Image: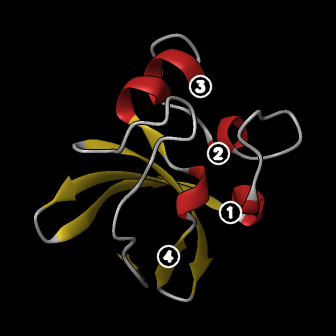
Amino acid sequence: MELESTPESLTCTECGEELSDQGYLPAVERDDDYEPLPDGAICGACGFNEVGFAGCAPELDDVVGSDSDLASDADQADALLHVRITEDGLDVLSAKE
């Protein structure tokens, strides 16, 4: 699956740093593509250490929903993408639905 659009930059909602390597991005699944919701982006470090379960990658419910401190427009997400930032944009490494 591909992204319908690619955000110019992603800022971690947990620490405020710009994502430069990899991270997690909530998205809405549309047909064969994902529409990213950059307001809920999480950097890899925060995903593993602050948001996910002690050293584990976060789940979608960790990033969105009523129990999340990161609740925003990303609440409409139905997938959490593990992405890598490249010179050409974003590569989707995996998706959790």
**Residue 58, percent from left and from top:** 55, 32
Is 58 left, or right, of 2 in this rendering?
A: right
- What is the secondary structure assignment of the residue under circle 1? loop
The residues tagged by marks 3 and 2 sit, at their Cα atoms, a distance apart of 10 Å
Q: If the image is split into quadrants, where does the C terminus sit?
A: bottom right
Relative to residue 20, is residue 68 depicted above or below? Answer: above
Relative to residue 84, is residue 32 depicted above or below? Answer: below
Is 83 left, or right, of 74 in this rendering?
A: left
Q: Residues within 10 Å of mark 3 (few under 14, many from 20)?
A: many
Q: Nearer the viewer, mark 3 or mark 1?
A: 3
- What is the secondary structure assignment of the residue under circle 4? strand
The residues tagged by marks 4 and 2 sit, at their Cα atoms, a distance apart of 14 Å
Which residue does the numbered mark 3 point to in the structure image? 51
The residues tagged by marks 1 and 2 sit, at their Cα atoms, a distance apart of 8 Å
**Residue at (43, 85) in percent of width and height:** 4
**Residue at (57, 40) in percent of width and height:** 13
Q: Is residue 52 visible?
A: no
- What is the secondary structure assignment of the residue under circle 3? helix
Instruction: Identify the mark nearer the N-term, 1 or 2.
Output: 2
Residue 60's label in the rendered image is 2
**Residue 75, percent from left and from top:** 77, 57
Which residue does the numbered mark 1 point to in the structure image? 78
The residues tagged by marks 3 and 4 sit, at their Cα atoms, a distance apart of 22 Å
Q: Residues within 10 Å of mark 1 (few under 14, many from 20)?
A: some
Q: Which amino acid type is shown beneath numbered disc 2?
A: Leu
Q: If the image is split into quadrants, where does the N terminus sit?
A: bottom left
